Image (tube, rainbow, N blue to C red):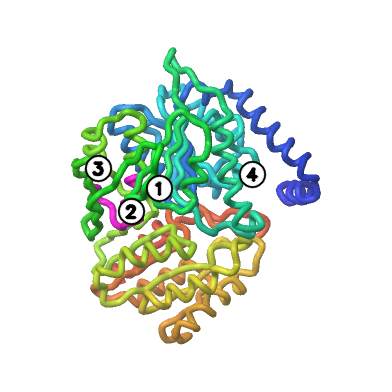
Amino acid sequence: MIGIVKASILKFTPQKLLFLYHLSLSQLGALFYGYPSEKLIVIGVTGTSGKSTTVFILHSLLEGAGYAVGSLSTIAFRVGKEFQMNNRKMTMLGRFQTQKFLRKMVRAGCRYAIVETTSQGIEQSRHRGIHYDLLLFTNLYPEHIEAHGGFENYKKAKLKLFDYLSKSKNKNIRKESIPKTIIVNGDDQYAGEFLNFQVDKKYAYTIENKDLSGIQVVKIEKPQANQEGVSLEIEGRSFYAPVRGMHNLKNISAALTVGHALSISWEDLGKSTRNLPPVPGRLEYLNEGQKYDVVVDYAFEPRAMESLHDTLRPFGYKKIIQVLGGTGGGRDKARRPIIGKMAAQFATVVIVTNEDPYDENPREIMNQVEVGALEAGKKDGTNLFVIEDRRQAIAKAIFLAEPGSLILITGKGSEQAMVGPHGKFFLWDDREVAREEIKKALNK
């Protein structure tokens, strides 16, 4: 009830007052916890996709190089060796919560803090009070458009973060001056705009060997992705990582460039990439002894789903069953039939289910996804099923699976909750539910 009242008040508050409200909270949070980011080298990661995976990979690379690291992302909150799944249904936490974690990182002796930084968080000034040193831009394409009122507003929100870095003072940690640094995906069409800020160092990583004059370029050569993992070369050095998909090759390239900018040797970075742990909820395979593959992935929007399908398509599965929802209530509605159509074109069987409806009618959301699947030729009750209960939907997929099949469960990844009306949380983890249902099927 308190959350509803607060949302109503904020809705009718003038924008200038709202900005001051958000800014004051950010400053108070930093003050309350003693400005912890002043004692850490803070790396901000932003972009449309790949942020969480890149944060996870970068944490592993820095840790593998011998540093104590903390990170905050959609996937997890990590302080040194302490690992806590993100159970808040928020990528970028509130100001006091973020500052509390940064303070814990300082106390744990961390040198680096990696903060996944979202456009909505930036619009609410949640980045203020965090003294960033390095910003990484992964990519940009239309997403969260309804929330921002258009793509240009969405882009401007991202650019505010880089402007914030350029105007901040250089940090000194133990008499070491930390350079302000920008790193961008040089293959993105908006790379130039994110490089157009006055900082100490600028880098770009590129697979397409784009011509980027005036900055340090890390050229990614011989990029390859197969069922075993991905490989690439930089300056004649070979790198391998046991993760699948070209999209993950780009995420690894981003993390390697950050490591290079932080003066970590290519040799040390290469050792770490070979030993990367699986990323929770991102192309995560579940194995309970079944004779078919089960993959859980976070992909919920068209571009990410396309990359996911492209990664899995060459594996030659006899039958593919995709379980998906409508990307959550209140989000971009136009993409719902699009992802329904994409799933229908990729999978043998499509099962549409509930997924974070918030205050929308879940049945209406599912119907919009179903429309896309029907347009692509699927038939209700034959190779298209609409099952509101997400557990029952996953159980149906398992029932339909055969040896050599793939069950693909998308939309939530490793999220720890589902959100219903009035922001009410229900404990949920696609991975755990799928494991439970697989075990039930095996024991019948």
Query: Mark 4: which secondary structure?
Result: helix
Residue 431: image location, x then y, percent: 39, 57
**Residue 56 visible from this viewpoint:** no
**Dot 4 or dot 1, earlier in sequence:** 4
The residue singled out by tag 3 in the image is 234
Residue 249 lies within the magenta run: yes
- Cβ atoms under marks 2 and 1 closer than 8 Å: yes
Residue 198: image location, x then y, percent: 52, 32
- Which residues make up the magenta segment? 241-253
**Dot 4 or dot 3, earlier in sequence:** 4
The residue singled out by tag 2 in the image is 208
Residue 265 lies within the magenta run: no
Dot 2 surroundings within 10 Å: few (below 14), some, or many (20 or more)? few
- Cβ atoms under marks 3 and 1 closer than 8 Å: no
4 or 3: mark nearer the eye: 3
**Dot 2 or dot 1, earlier in sequence:** 1
Q: Say if 285 sits above or below 274 in the image.
A: below
Residue at the image position 73 percent from the left and 51 percent from the top: 4
The residue singled out by tag 4 in the image is 123
What label does residue 186 carry, if any? Answer: 1
Q: Say if 306 sits above or below 228 in the image.
A: below
**Dot 2 or dot 3, earlier in sequence:** 2
- Cβ atoms under marks 4 and 1 closer than 8 Å: no
Q: Amino acid at mark 4?
A: Glu
**Residue 115 visible from this viewpoint:** yes
Residue at the image position 60 percent from the left and 42 percent from the top: 122
